Image (cartoon, grey):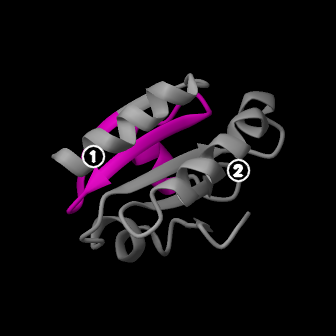
Amino acid sequence: MSECVREVTDNSFDQMIINNPKPVLVDFWAPWCGPCQMIGPLIEKIAKEFEGEVEVFKMNVDQNQVIPSGLGVRSIPQLITFKNGELLETIVGSPEPQKLVELVERSLDS
């Protein structure tokens, strides 16, 4: 992970995501998930492209199960945007790069 993408855990979720005034993108993933590994570079690119505007986090669902369960994360990769503690949108699976850019841009507009 780069300095643009940070790890979030069950314990730090409220502080880093819910109480964050900026739009946030959270990538729910696991090390054994092939599609998760495939979109990793795309997540990094988005984090760099929107640095300062949107914060990007990854949550390992094997190590953190409380928050993903509470959000209904049953399939990974799953990308969720939040703003001011509100869940905005969810994408399940590997999105096309343009779809992910549009998801992040909508979080800025909301």
Q: State the SS at label 2.
A: loop
> Quick one: 55 or 78, which is closer to the camera?
55
Residue 39 is covered by the magenta coloring: no
Q: State the SS at label 1.
A: helix
Going 59% across and 56% down the picture, which residue do you hit? 58
Type of residue at label 1?
Answer: Ser
Percent x, y for residue 49? 51, 54
* Residue assigned mark 2: 62
Range drawn in magenta: 66-89
Among the 4 quarters of the image, the one containing residue 47: bottom right
* Residue assigned mark 1: 107
Left or right, 92 with reference to 35: left
> Quick one: 73 or 89, which is closer to the camera?
89
> Quick one: 27 or 40, which is closer to the camera?
40
In whole angstroms, how far apart are the C-alphas of marks 2 and 1?
27 Å
Q: Residue furthest front?
A: 49
Percent x, y for residue 13? 43, 67
Q: Quadrant of the N terminus?
A: bottom right
